[in-house]
Image (cartoon, helix red, strand yellow):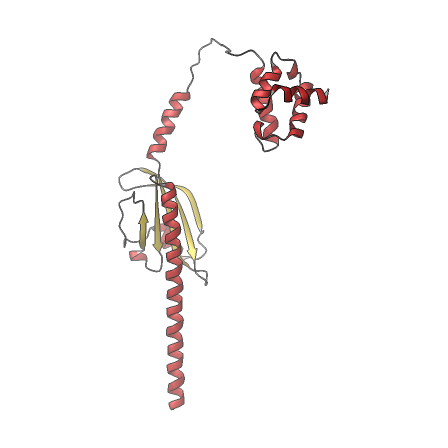
Amino acid sequence: MSHNKNRLKLHKASDKTGLLMSVSKENTLLAQIDTIAKGLSETLAPFCEVVVHDLKNPKHSILSIHNNLSGRKIGESTTELGLARIDSADFPSIISNYTNQFSDGRPVKSTSIGIKDDNGNYVAALCLNLDMTLFRGMQSMLSQFTEVGTSPIKEHIEPNGSEAIRLRIDQFAATLAATPRTLKASDRKTLIETLRNEGLLDVKKSMETIAQHLGVSRASVYLYAKKES
């Protein structure tokens, strides 16, 4: 009888130790997530709010809010996405760039990242809420600034053909996943031959245009052209 009681005590003690270890691991995980949230908020400030949710406590899930833009408070409840993750471990771990809004109507672009424990259950969420107000204003201003009229009058400020050379160089560089100024010497030689075959070297001041766009000297361009001739 005494032996059974001792086994029961040991079993209870083991369960308690396991529970404490589990809680400790979860707290460590949440602390790490909060550190990441803090770093993200400092990098994306002042436009992005970063929130950490403890999904084990949905009624008071908000553990921290960095760069608070929504006006919410620590200890408030989780969102619909949080509840969906609690209900199903099969819910997507990342929901990115979805339309949202703050309580005052400001437009928001949000991303929600779910974090699972060793058993595959969601225990936390990291949420980023980007205030789009300023960006939409900038987009509107840029759209207005870059808008051009439909006047029938055409004018070219530079000699004909120079723009065609630049566009062809850009196209060539793009096929190599590069920019004109990052092309290797061997690529430049191939480019010059391509321009020659397409008749673009016959354009007035072509060598000067090529040199300027590649960020090299005219002497280098003449050298590439001579080697390919």
- Residue at left offset 56%, top offset 20%: 212
Quarter of the image where the N terminus is located: bottom left
Question: Where residue 38 appears, x then y in whole percent?
Answer: 36, 49
Residue lying farthest top?
A: 153
**Residue at (31%, 49%) from the top-left corner?**
65
x and y percentages locating residue 99 in the rendered image: 38, 40
Q: Note whether residue 37 is visible.
A: yes
Residue 162 occupies quadrant:
top right
Residue at the bottom extreme of this rendering: 1
| Nearer to me, 211 or 7 | 211
Q: How many marks?
A: 0
Up the image or down, 204 lies above or below 41; here it is: above
Residue 86 appearing in the image: no
Q: Is residue 23 above or below residue 52?
A: below
* Residue ID at (29%, 57%): 59
Return the x and y of residue 45 as percentages of the image width and height. Answer: 35, 41
Q: Quadrant of the C terminus?
A: top right
Query: Image quarter for residue 85?
Result: bottom left
Q: Position of residue 203 (x, y in %)?
A: 62, 13
